[in-house]
Structures are given as C-alpha cells and as structure tokens.
Image (tube, rainbow, N blue to C red):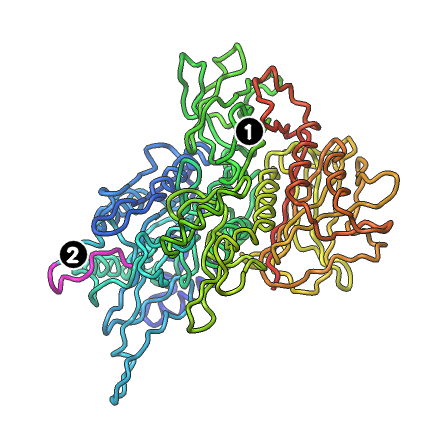
Amino acid sequence: MKRRAFLQRAGIALAAMGASEAGLLWISDRYSQALAQTSSRKLALLVGINQYPQSPALAGCLTDVELQRELLLYRFGFQPQDVLVLTDGQATRQNIESAFVEHLIKQAKPGDGVIFHFSGYGSQLAVAGETPIPAVTGETPIPQEKETTQLPITNDQLPKIQNCLIGFDGLLSTKDNAGVNVLAEETLWLLLRSLQSDRITTILDTSFTDPSTKGLIPPLVGNLRMRSRPLLPGNQLGAKELAFQAELASQLKTDAIQKLLGTDKPGQLLAASDSDRIATELQWNGFSAGVFTYALTQHLWQVTEATTVQIAMSRIVSTVAQVAGHQQHPSLTCPRSEQQTQTYHFSPELNTGAEGAVIGLEDSGKTALLWLAGLPATILEIYGINSVLNVVSPANADTEKTLPTLQIRSREGLKAKARILSTDVDQIQSGQLVQESIRVLPRNIGLTVALDASLERIERVDATSAFANVPQVSSVIAGEQPADCLFARVDAVSSISIPQYGLFNLGKELIANTTGEPGEAIKTAVYRLTPKLRTQLAAKLLRLSGNEASSRLAVKATLERVAQGEQILMHKVTRRAGRKNPSNRVLSSVNSDTSILRMAVGSQIQYRLENESESPVYVMLVGIDSGGNAIALYPQTTDSKDLVILPGESIVIPQITSPFKSIVSAPPGLAETHLIFSLAPFRSAIAALDSVNPPRGDQTRIAPLFNPLDVARAIFQDLHQASAVTTDALGISSDSWALDVNAWATLSFVYEVV
C-alpha cells in the first residue's frame, strides 16, 4: 500500500478512535521505516506428508519438500539452518503451527524473505452456524445442496465450508464432540498476517475438492493421484485449533498497523490448483512428485532473468496443462502491486540458469553427486547415461579458467553420479551449478499406456494382450507405474452400459478422435488406435528435444495473430545463447493473467523466426493440433527444400505472400507446435516428409503429417549428425542419440483452442 493510501485509510480509523494527528504520523513513520529496512536473511518452513494413519498414502510429498529445499539452498542462497523441514510424523497440526511461530514469526524481520510450503492432503469441513470464511482466491464458498423440507432454511442454518490442511494426525479418530484436528485455512491466513515481513511466499500443493472417483483406493484420476480427501466428519474445528485462532486474532487486533492494513492475505500465494479443482501428483521414472511443485521448481532452476511471478505462473500453468489437462489449474493470488514482483520475491543468487547442482563428492573427489531437478521431468526420466554437463563458473571466478565437465555414469530418480572429465578434480566443489552440454537419449524409446483402474479385470487382461502386439507400445495398470497416456472406457452417453473405449491424457481427458463404436471389442479398439498411438509416441519424442533453457544457439521465435496487423501473443528465446544484443534475452508477457494462452477457432496465426547467431540455421516445424493430429511445415517444392535463415535475418511462416494461411481449427483442446533449429540441414526429415506424398505446389504450407513417428525419428537423426559428438571418446553407444546444445534449439508453443 502506498503511503498516501495508508494515511487516508488510517486517518479514518484513527479519527473514529480519537487518535491525534501526531499519533497518526508516528504510526506512519514506523510503517515507512519498517518497509525501508533491508535484510539478507531468508527463512523457509517446508512441510510434506506421505504417510497418513487410516488413509491411503501419498507418494510425492516428501519429494516436493526435497525439491524446494535443494532449490532454496543451491539456487537462492538460503542457509541450511534457515530451512526447517517437517515430514510425515513430525508434521502434526500442532507441530506445524508451533514451527510457524518459532521459526518464522519470531525470527522474521521486516524485509526478510519468508517461504511456507505445504504438500499433503487437503479437505473441507462443513461448520454449522459459523461466519463464512473468505475463500482462497476471493471466490464465494462452494454452495451446499439443501434437503427438501417444508420449513424455510435461513443462511445461519446452512453449514459454512472451510478449507483445511491435513497434518499427520488430522485424519485420526477423535473423541466425541472433540472437533476435527486440522489446520484451518483461516488459521494459516492469521499466521501469515502475523509476520513482520511483507516478502512472503506461500506454496500449497494440495487441494480441497473431492470429485467422485467411484471408491478407488488410492484416489486416482486417470494415472494421477489426488491430494484431497472427502468432506471431513463432524461440524466443528478442534478446541485447540479454535483457541489458537482466537489467540492469533487477538494479537493482531492489538497491532494498529496490521489492523489498519486489513485482512488481505499478504505476499504471493501459489496454489497447485483453483479451489474447485484437484491438485495431483505423478509417478515418473524413479520418483513421484507433485505436478505443480515439480513444474514450479524446475522453472526456477532454469530461469535466467528477473522473471515476474505472473510470467512464471503462466509458464507453469502451461506445463501442468500438458500433464493434467483441465483437471488441475494452478492459481496465483497476490495484491495487484505484487503481480510484477519476482517469484519468491528475490532473484537467484547467480544470473544464470542451471539443470542442477553438485551436492557431494565421492571416490576421493573423482565422482560428483548431482541433483538434476532443473531438467523437465519428461526429459529427466529418459535422460541417458553418458550425458555431459558443464560446471558453471561462480560470479567472481576467473572466467579464463576452463572448468571441468561431468559425464553421468548412473542415475536414480533426481540424483545422478558423474565422473569428472578433468585431471584437476580440485576445481569441483559441492554447491556448484551444472548446465547441460550433451543430451544422450536412447533410440529405442517406446510408449507406455496405463489401463484405467475402473476397467474390469477381464477388460484389463484383454487390453494387456492386445497392446503386447503393438510395436514399441507397452501397458501398465494405472497408478502403479509411469505412463504416457491412458486407455479407458468413454463415459456412457445413455443409461445403457455398453463398453466404448478411447485414448485419454493422464488426467483422463479424452484425446480427440479416439472414441470407438459402442460395443467394440477391446482388441479391435487397440488395433483401431494404433495410428493414434504412433502419433502419441511421435509427440513424446518431439518434447524430448525441448531445450529452450539450455541451448546455446541464438534464435528467437514469436507467435503472432494476424488480425488488423500483427498481434504478438508469445515470445520464446534461447536464454543462454551469446548475443550481440543481450536485451533480446528478456521475455515479455502479453497475457494479463496467468492462464494458458487461448486461441479462438478461426484465428489466423504465424510464426516469426529470428537468427541471432553468426551461422545460417535450418528450421523444421512439427506439432500436434487440438484434434490430436500431427502437422508439419512442408517446404517449397523447389530445387532446395531447406528452410534456412541467414545470420541476422528473420522469416515468417507461413510466408506472408503464401495463399496457404495457418488457421486455428476445431475441436477445442490443447495444441503444441515445436520449432526446431539446427546448424545443419534436415536431410533425413525432409526425405521422410517427401515419402508420404506431400502437398503439391510451390508455396510453403503447414499441413497434416501422415507419418509423424518416421519424421520425429528422422529429426533426431539429423540433430545427432549436426552435433558431431565424438561418441567413441565419450563411450556413447551407437544405440543412442547424442545432441550438442551448441548445435540445436527447440522452441515449443502450447496453447488452448477454444
């Protein structure tokens, strides 16, 4: 709040209390002094609960806490003693509240950075006769259904809904009329308002709503595990929780400044999902984590500039949407004045992004232990042995000195062991950041389909048998192992229960054009879906090429809408590439909110591509439209089909003079476009395009791609050859692709067609 607004608001209140003008000025001066104070201290309280007595266990909450802790220590410069972690049995309601008071409230001074993170179950409590509790995002509380009765029901008789965080002991049975032993959301707001600092970030990777999952244990939505429990029994909070609330409220009322500032939640609130949707966790290869927490921390590992929290959340929303669809939608709540502040209220310690950090040394300093949470999860779970990373030079280090490189020898989940490719091992120290140099991926990547848990046993047996006959496709039971998509029944459109099958994303949203006829046999359905499965595998491969953050190839792409001029919708730029004009690295946001970019059917779009490097670059455009179909850019049918951009120049695709426009078409859904740049021509990929009768004509156009898997593999082969990595010297197998970040860049655009 600005000083003038504070004085106006305070003046009214103090006049009512009979306060003097001198008293008002004294309070305002104290307020200004508090805001002017600076402090380098940063405090964090991280809570994660997997194991709940009398409730299905979660799997990713402890990983969430570890993700946050390593990020704060190695990327944001927190001191280990200032990061307090409570997990499982330590994280009772009383312990969480006590830790908040002792570790945060009693220690935080004006100007300190404060972070509170919670990963675990959330739920709701219907409290009879209570005053309505403000909703998390400023929305009205969820209305409750009324029972039919002849007598009128007043608002005071209706139960009021309170959102609650469930500690380790929150679901245990209590004595009759003892109330529910949970941490109410209103208590959390009171705790936050009790902090002296206004540089506060709250992360809640939990949800409160409980959609029907047909009694499945653990509660699954597709292949995602929900972090919410059904409506809590009883109709009141526990006596100790109510007493603690009253104590906090009483203390706040005695603080004139806090009272005058009102009851808005301070700082940034980053929630894994809107109040009426679910938050989920997902199992990847070797670890489970909250979909939101991983997207958040991974983004902050790689960020290179002072990105605002609003831009950060828009990127995170896009990442989450690719996994969970509409089931989960992260939200940002903060005063308007803070929407342009940095995420977590401060910048990373070094003005450079990273894929991870050195967290230890073994074998007399010859082996480095790495934390690799800066890589997107979809890439990390397939990240190949022998991949190479560079150690990042500290800000005050001698830049002329060559720092050693590290080669991964083994990986388990988020951690890896790497041999040091240098004789001077003394240069490696714990805490140093590492950046990707050579990405090694296996050539034999397959697609894994999860069989929905609601399928009958005989259906799962038949489906398993059918998928076993599809090349490079395997099946697992949903919730048991990682997967790329979901095979399930399509919801019946009539009262007659006739099986009808389709392909879904992991959040159980139907992929367009995959529904079969009612009564279709499972083996017939799998055979029918085989082309779609190949498209899904191609999409998986294309996403594995993404390296916007790690590429050293200086290129830029802009998505524009053509309507009465060119309207810029989204920028993408390689962040670590050297440029003549460093300001070109800075990204701008067009959206005024944190939602995923939405594009209306019928919109005409184009991509503006810029080459800021000193060499010619070649370009391929491939993607998946909102109908689940593959698309590609078909170059001109002239003597040279290479789409090349000379140094310092730019092109627009489709070409402005081309009669073939790029029009956004139905159906509604997510669409993704990958613009792949390389220092060498895409000879294999163009040959694959030509093999399926490309559109005729002399104009470049974006058209359906009928052999997406062949083209995707050919692109990787071209990038492998362009990289020219000395695979023998590095011990890289011929069964792998080795991609050098200096030789290629993939910039991806994801938007929702509406």
Q: Is residue 181 magenta?
A: yes
Q: Are marks 1 and 2 in contact (CB under 8 Å)?
A: no
**Relative horizontal placement of residue 373, taking residue 708 as reference (left or right):** left
Image spot of residue 484 (x, y percent) = 50, 46
Q: Amino acid at mark 2?
A: Ser
* Mark 1 residue crowding within 10 angstroms, few (<14) / some (14–19) / many (20+): many
What predominant SS class does the magenta segment belong to? loop
Residue at x 79% of width, y 41% of height: 643
- Mark 2 surroundings within 10 Å by alpha-carbon count, few (fewer than 14), some (14 through 19), many (20 or more): some
Instruction: Using the image, determine if residue 738 lies above or below residue 30.
Output: above
Q: Position of residue 666 (x, y in %)?
A: 64, 63
Give the secondary structure at mark 1. strand
* Viewer can see residue 345: no
Q: Which residues are magenta?
A: 175-184
Q: Give the residue at x 44% y 30%.
A: 371
Of the residues shown, which amino acid type is indicated by label 1? Answer: Gln
**Residue assigned mark 1:** 435
Q: Is residue 275 above or below residue 634?
A: below
As helix, strand or loop, the secondary structure at mark 2 comes to: loop
In the rendered view, tell whether residue 652 sits above or below residue 679. below
Query: What residue appears at the point 68 percent right and 23 percent down from the top-left corner?
Result: 724
Q: CA distance from mark 1 to mark 2?
A: 49 Å
Q: Mark 2 sits on what residue? A: 173
Q: Earlier in the sequence, mark 1 or mark 2?
A: 2
